[in-house]
């Protein structure tokens, strides 16, 4: 029997875009039932971001499989009553509205715990539910800026953002782990908890290495593009065929191996200009000339072969096409398919091979696809549903 860890857990998600949907999709992967509340008509904003996946949004199909879509116009009392009814028996309520928005609808912990004392409430926002930045608008790139991420990412001339929504992902991951912990705690106490997730705090945690590196006013790590800020050689290098190979040295033993086997220049290992990492880091330009003189005579595959022989860490500089075709993902059978309103699409299985259950990989819903079924489940009659539809409440 395929019993998943969160089978029987119901999550009501008043969510949009990435942070909360990324959290709830992972809960769904483990078997939780996710009832996603969307606006009637267009639904989640992220549905309209692009049309890259069979006419559907790349953002949306990534984080919304295995969910049920219920459309509710929460400005209407009948729709708000449906949400409150759902929360009477739900295990988790997650939302990433602006701070205070849920409370204005009466969705406070105090009110919801009257009918459902075991309910776990999780709110995700840019800066948290208090403090001077509480009501400041917060998008992923803005949080990358506030958290100092841009100051250490990019080239010396140009700060650069991450190529994906790293602040949203960080917040979604901490919401996910906090909810799992809250479910464990509820098993011991029988009581629900309130979780306040801040995107700034989530990304600040991930910034702790550069934060400590700049301890007591020390200079922070410099921006070095794809090269390591403090270790050298560690980063991208061009081979003679024009392709880029990533490599990284971690210690002096590897430096000796690099000189002897990769550069075929054993005497360089004893050169006092480069015999310690801090010296190599200070004299990058001089050392790069020596490295380039060797690498320019090798194809990328010849270079990787030498690096492998020397047991020096290395990687291809893949693009998205390279990742789609990655032989390691294929060998480990990491690809499957999920359904969408526009047909099946490939999907990566969640990270982590588990021998006791299979991940849930159900379809991505269309807007409001499950509205009628959920309302009937709550006991609403056909006439009531028709009336709500006529008024635009669903």
Image (cartoon, rainbow, N blue to C red):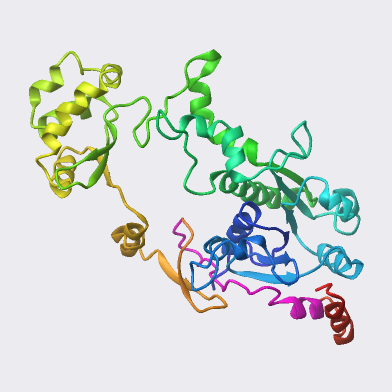
Quarter of the image with the C terminus in it: bottom right
Q: Residue at x 17, y 13 (%)?
A: 272
Report the front residue among 54 and 23: 54
Viewed as shown, does residue 230 lie left or right of 388?
Answer: left
Picture coordinates of residue 66 (x, y %)? 60, 69
Q: Nearer the viewer, residue 168 or 30?
A: 168
Whole-percent x, y for residue 117 in the image: 85, 54
Query: In this picture, which residue range is highlighted in magenta?
Result: 352-377
Q: Residue furthest front?
A: 157
Most extreme residue toward the bottom is 382
Quadrant housing residue 235: top left
Q: Nearer the viewer, residue 47 or 234?
A: 47
**Residue 216, placed above or below residue 364:** above
Magenta region includes residue 374: yes
Across and down, in percent, residue 233 comes to 26, 29
Residue 118 is inside the magenta segment: no
Above or below: residue 228 compared with residue 279: below
Which residue is located at x 50 percent, y 29 percent?
151
Residue at horizontal 83 percent and vertical 79 percent from the top: 389
Is 279 left, or right, of 208 in this rendering? left
Considering the whole magenta stretch, tell me its main secondary structure. loop
- Specify whether 384 is left or right of 366: right
């Amino acid at each position: 029997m395929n019993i998943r860890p969160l089978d029987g857990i119901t999550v009501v998600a008043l969510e949009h875009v990435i942070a909360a949907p990324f959290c709830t999709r992972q809960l769904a992967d483990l078997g939780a039932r996710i009832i996603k509340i969307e606006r009637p008509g267009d639904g989640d904003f992220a549905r309209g971001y692009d049309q890259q996946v069979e006419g559907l949004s790349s953002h949306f199909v990534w984080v919304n499989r295995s969910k049920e879509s219920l459309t509710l116009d929460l400005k209407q009392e009948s729709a708000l009553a449906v949400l409150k009814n759902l929360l009477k028996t739900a295990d988790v309520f997650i939302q990433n509205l602006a701070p205070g928005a849920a409370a204005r609808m009466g969705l406070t912990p105090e009110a919801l715990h009257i009918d459902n004392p075991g309910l776990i409430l999780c709110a995700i926002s840019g800066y948290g539910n208090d403090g001077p930045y509480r009501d400041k608008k917060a998008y992923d790139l803005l949080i990358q800026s506030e958290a100092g991420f841009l100051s250490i990412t990019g080239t010396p001339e140009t700060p650069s953002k991450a190529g994906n929504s790293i602040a949203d992902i960080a917040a979604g991951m901490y919401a996910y782990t906090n909810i799992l912990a809250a479910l464990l705690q509820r098993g011991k106490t029988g009581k629900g908890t309130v979780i306040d997730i801040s995107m700034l705090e989530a990304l600040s945690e991930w910034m702790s290495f550069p934060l400590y590196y700049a301890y007591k006013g020390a200079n922070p790590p410099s921006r070095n593009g794809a090269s390591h800020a403090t270790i050298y050689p560690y980063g991208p290098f061009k081979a003679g065929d024009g392709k880029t190979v990533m490599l990284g040295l971690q210690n002096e033993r590897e430096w000796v191996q690099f000189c002897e086997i990769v550069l075929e220049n054993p005497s360089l290992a004893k050169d006092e200009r480069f015999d310690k990492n801090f010296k190599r880091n200070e004299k990058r330009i001089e050392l790069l000339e020596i490295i380039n003189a060797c690498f320019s005579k090798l194809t990328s595959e010849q270079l990787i072969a030498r690096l492998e022989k020397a047991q020096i860490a290395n990687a291809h500089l893949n693009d998205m096409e390279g990742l789609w075709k990655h032989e390691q993902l294929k060998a480990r059978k990491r690809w499957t398919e999920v359904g969408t309103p526009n047909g099946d699409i490939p999907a990566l299985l969640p990270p982590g091979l588990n021998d006791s259950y299979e991940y849930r990989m159900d379809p991505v819903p269309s807007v409001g696809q499950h509205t009628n079924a959920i309302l009937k489940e709550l006991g609403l009659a056909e006439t009531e549903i028709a009336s709500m539809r006529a008024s635009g409440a669903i």
